[in-house]
Image (spheres, rainbow, N blue to C red):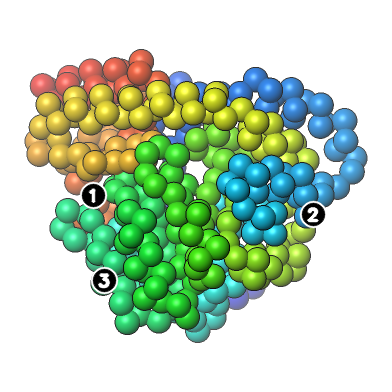
Amino acid sequence: MSRYLRPDYQTLQVYTPGEQPHDRKYIKLNTNESPYPPAPSVLSAVVSEVQNLNLYSDPNCEALRKAVAQRYDVEADQVFLSNGSDDILNFAFMAFAGRGGKAYFPDVTYGFYKVFAELHGVHYETIPLKDDFTLCVDDYRGHDGLIVIANPNAPTGLALGLDEIKTLLRDHPQNVVVIDEAYIDFGATSCTRLIDTYSNLLVVQTFSKSCSLAGARLGFALGSKELIDDLNRIKFSTNPYNVNRMTMAAGIAALSEQSYYDECCRSIIEARKHTIAELRKLHFDVTDSLGNFVFAQSHILDGTVIYQKLRDRGILVRHFDGTRVSPYNRITIGTPEQMEALLSALKEILEE
Ligand code: PMP
């Protein structure tokens, strides 16, 4: 760090992304990527867009916005697109909280929320989940500020129902409620259809997980035209071209491949069910995850030990520090073969 860095950034605790090591070939179950490639038409769409790379991308993302709007049955001006959903979450902290503003989110959730809050000088408070990691929306009552909820939550995979989200929205008419639906396509109920009724709702989704496009960096938000305008003010004050041409082409092509991606999600959900059942047979405590990952604790070995022993065997999972989560590991659902490799490695480790 240089002495020139502004003082409040010198103490910033940055987000630690899941490791991407290159020392050997790993079975990567640590960053919730899809194990399946993008649909073949996505590849050809990207390749044919390359010839236009001398030209800037469309800052309004017109074609992709229309395609997203059609897919989710909303108006194009209720759609915002950006460079991954992290970008949108960052904008949401800037737009709807900012320096001196307030934000509330669970104590166990996506680690980037507190980084964004700190980056923008937002006073944040974490609201503890119950002992079983479930979220009680009444615990947010009386708190005045931006509310950010991942649904399903990460790393637990536990999801709220529509009625609970409606309660949050009704309890906080003066505040923006961000529902981060990064993992929604793996079995939970989306609240996108509530955006016409609740002007304080911003739903954030991503092409990274269910559309196998993590490397393309494409996220979107759905909300009232006013909230979308607010996000655009920030985007047009930072980087109007933050969705590049190849990603835009990939997104449009992906949206026309619904049956391919439905099938990918179905396979992941099947593999998740099987993995949860098998882990429970091995006496793991596993949450009822509706994400493309499971969150599991062994009663025999500590989370760090399991993480390390799997890593030694060429299998990467995600371990988080923190009293409530460190006994656990978050394991991304891969192909059935990858999950078999994981399960037999775990059996071996537990028998050692
Ligand atoms: N929200 C949650 C809950 C996540 O786990 C992730 C992925 N790390 C994101 C948002 C960001 O996804 P992306 O930026 O790839 O769209």
Residue beneath the point at 51% across and 66% down: 197
Within-10-Å neighbours for mark 2: few <14, some 14–19, many 20+: some
Q: Which disc number belongs to residue 326?
A: 1
Q: Residue 58, relative to residue 229: is it above or below?
A: above
Residue 234 x %, y %: 69, 68
Q: Earlier in the sequence, mark 1 or mark 2?
A: 2
The residue tagged 3 is 138
Within-10-Å neighbours for mark 3: few <14, some 14–19, many 20+: few
Give the quadrant of the N terminus. Answer: bottom right
Q: Secondary structure at mark 3?
A: helix
Q: Secondary structure at mark 1?
A: loop
Q: Residue 63, relative to residue 144: is it above or below?
A: above
Residue at the far right in the pictured view: 54
The residue tagged 2 is 59
To which quarter of the image does residue 162 belong? bottom left
Q: Amino acid at mark 2?
A: Pro
Using the numbered discs, state the Cα–Cα distance from disc 3 to disc 2 in whole angstroms.
40 Å
Q: Secondary structure at mark 2?
A: loop
Residue 3 x %, y %: 60, 72
Does the residue tagged 3 have its C-beta within 8 Å of any atom of ligand 1? no
Q: Residue 47, relative to residue 214: is it above or below?
A: above
Asked if the residue under mark 2 is in contact with the one under mark 1, i.e. CB atoms within 8 Å, the reply is: no
Q: Earlier in the sequence, mark 3 or mark 1?
A: 3
Residue 10 x %, y %: 52, 71
Residue beneath the point at 33% across and 41% down: 290
Asked if the residue under mark 2 is in contact with the one under mark 3, i.e. CB atoms within 8 Å, the reply is: no
Q: Residue 137, relative to residue 141: is it above or below?
A: above
Does the residue tagged 2 have its C-beta within 8 Å of any atom of ligand 1? no
